[in-house]
Image: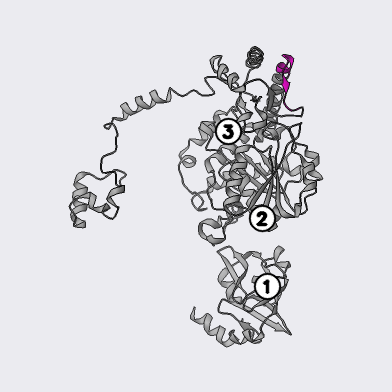
């Protein structure tokens, strides 16, 4: 089948075969009043060379984190990507195939996904990982649905320190399916108010979901999760910045029943916020309730090691009415990017990058505090923290003139945090960047 | 492999009745058709169910199928062993591979089920 549109000669032939005079007759069943009845207002066709020039011109209008020193985080983190990731990802075998799960044709892809699952289980200290879902937000929503399937309850409890957009996605999933969502507030330290659990009837809830480090960069009280009174509700842990797992205890160590996350930090570009990688892990006993697909290891007739889809997505071909999820897409290429990234860094390298993030962030926090600013929350944090500052929007606007993207204004998401700026530091920042930024903030102190 | 003393449904379930309690599983023919069984989703005990309602699921390497209860009543017991050893259904479909027990609401429903001979005829036709 040639991938070219039909010629006018083709069109004539098709019309003749159909016994009609004009193309328009094919659309005669569409009411006239909703038809456009004119051509689209498009410029004339251009040659490839002209189009390329035009697109370069448009693209040059974009300003990215390469043009500024950026302190933006809040769920999307700018990290270094080793050259191995790009080089291997651009191979045709990885770049092109759609739904490449036939074992007789796709051993390469299946092997990489199997490795990905193994790495996620190690990273999150969980027993089973699927081959990935869309992104962190949908992973959290799917985890909530899964917990309700297991517990046969109809409400979930979310920490309000979970990424606000993640909570929106969870609500969209829950409310459209007739399930309820309640929230736990956060305290003066920026941590989830776990003592509110005392006043809740927990036997109504299928899940208690928390995020650590949370949206404010604050590391939650992990020890409290270990001894949480749950009354049969499952604990869902969400990790929006998996690089934190190089220095912070993983979800499996504090009793998470389901642990999800956003894998964007593991070898993916920011690229307007996606495509990203939804990490989804759980305990073996809940395997059958997991959404998505799982790649497993087996042997062929000759006893050779090989890989197959061990758990297929029910939403695709078997018992669709009883699907565990309405989305069976996994972000294959992103999962493979994460696998190459982690393999490139190795265990020690991963820990090191994680430590650099921690140290540089704390260096900046100290520099800012020295200049008389107050941290919003006096709690341990990983690679982001919030400060109190007058008129954060103005700070961000002025920062652009000085070559900084100063961070994220928290008032956008939390009405009560109008005078707060969320600042993120990664290994991409030089110490000089950090000192210059601290001085810039000092100049903005009085608004 | 079609024991004479059992009753059968056209959906390949068998039932063995003792007093007011029926034990239900799937036939040897059904487990052969399904292939290696890897997972059984058991019904909830205490649940009231109606005749030919889907109450459980067996998943094999080939497919997933619903299990229908051949009679109405209350689920009194499920075979927990299938959680760890779903292959019992392949190995011993009429014995250790039983799936659930049910308290009969209306024993007359048994008359609507197939005898061993009728069921054998059905499998020959499929």
Q: Residue at x 71, y 37 (%)?
A: A212
Mark pair 2, 1: CA separation: 21 Å
Which residue is tagged 2?
A154
Q: In this view, does A91 lie above or below A284?
A: above
Q: Can residue A292 be seen in this view?
A: no
Mark pair 3, 2: CA separation: 37 Å
Which residue is tagged 1?
B48
Disc 2 and disc 1 in contact, CB within 8 angstroms? no
Residue B69 marker: none
Which residue is tagged 3?
A267
- Of residue A60 and residue A385, the one placed in the foreground of this image is A385
Q: Residue at x 20, y 44 (%)?
A: A8
Q: Mark 1 lies on which chain?
A: B
Q: Is residue A83 above or below residue B78?
A: above
Left or right: where A67 falls relative to B40: left
Q: Residue at x 80, y 49 (%)?
A: A229
Residue numbers of the magenta segment = A366-377
């Amino acid at each position: 089948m040639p991938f070219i549109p039909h010629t006018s000669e083709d069109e004539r032939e098709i019309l003749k075969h159909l016994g009609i005079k004009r193309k328009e007759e094919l659309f005669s069943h569409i009411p006239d009043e909703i038809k456009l009845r004119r051509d689209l207002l498009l410029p004339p066709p251009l040659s490839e060379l002209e189009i390329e020039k035009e697109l370069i011109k448009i693209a040059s209008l974009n300003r990215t984190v390469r043009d500024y020193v950026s302190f933006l985080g809040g769920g999307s983190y700018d990290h270094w990507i080793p050259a191995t990731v790009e080089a291997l990802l651009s191979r045709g075998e990885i770049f092109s195939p759609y739904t490449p799960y036939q074992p007789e044709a796709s051993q390469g892809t299946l092997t990489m996904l199997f490795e990905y699952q193994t790495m996620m289980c190690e990273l999150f200290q969980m027993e089973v990982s699927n081959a990935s879902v869309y992104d962190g937000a949908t992973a959290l929503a799917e985890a909530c649905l899964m917990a309700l399937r297991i517990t046969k309850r109809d409400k979930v409890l979310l920490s309000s320190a979970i990424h606000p957009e993640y909570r929106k996605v969870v609500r969209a999933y829950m409310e459209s399916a007739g399930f309820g969502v309640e929230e736990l507030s956060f305290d003066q330290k920026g941590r989830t108010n776990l003592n509110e659990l005392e006043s809740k009837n927990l036997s109504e809830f299928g899940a208690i979901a928390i995020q650590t480090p949370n949206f404010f960069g604050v590391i939650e009280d992990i020890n409290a999760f270990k001894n949480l009174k749950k009354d049969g509700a499952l604990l869902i842990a969400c990790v929006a910045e998996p690089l934190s797992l190089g220095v912070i205890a993983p979800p499996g160590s504090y009793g998470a029943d389901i642990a999800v996350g956003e894998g964007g930090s593991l070898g993916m570009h920011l690229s307007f916020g996606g495509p990203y990688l939804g990490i989804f892990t759980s305990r073996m006993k809940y395997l059958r309730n997991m959404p998505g697909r799982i790649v497993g290891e087996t042997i062929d007739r000759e006893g050779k090691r090989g890989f197959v889809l061990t758990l297929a997505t029910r939403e695709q071909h078997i018992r669709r009415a009883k699907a565990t999820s309405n989305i069976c897409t996994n972000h294959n290429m992103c999962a493979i990017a994460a696998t190459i990234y982690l393999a490139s860094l190795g265990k020690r390298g991963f820990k090191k990058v994680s430590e650099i993030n921690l140290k540089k962030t704390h260096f900046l926090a100290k520099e800012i505090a020295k200049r008389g600013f107050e941290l919003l929350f006096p709690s341990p944090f990983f690679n982001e923290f919030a400060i109190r500052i007058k008129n954060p929007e103005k700070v961000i606007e002025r920062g652009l003139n000085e070559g900084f993207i100063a961070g994220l204004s928290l008032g956008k998401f939390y009405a009560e945090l109008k005078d707060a700026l969320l600042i993120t530091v990664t290994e991409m920042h030089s110490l000089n960047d950090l000192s210059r930024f601290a001085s810039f903030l000092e100049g903005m102190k009085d608004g | 492999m079609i024991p004479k003393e059992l009753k059968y449904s056209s959906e390949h379930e068998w039932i063995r009745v003792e007093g007011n309690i029926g034990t239900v599983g799937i036939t040897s023919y059904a487990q052969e058709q399904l292939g290696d069984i890897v997972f059984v989703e058991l019904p909830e005990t205490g649940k009231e169910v109606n005749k030919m309602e889907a109450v459980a699921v067996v998943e094999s390497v080939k497919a997933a199928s619903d299990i229908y209860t051949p009679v109405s009543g209350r689920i009194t017991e499920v075979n927990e062993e299938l959680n760890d050893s779903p292959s019992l259904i392949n190995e011993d479909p009429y014995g250790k591979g039983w799936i659930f027990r049910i308290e009969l609401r209306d024993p007359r429903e048994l008359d609507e089920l197939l005898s061993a001979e009728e069921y054998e005829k059905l499998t020959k036709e499929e």
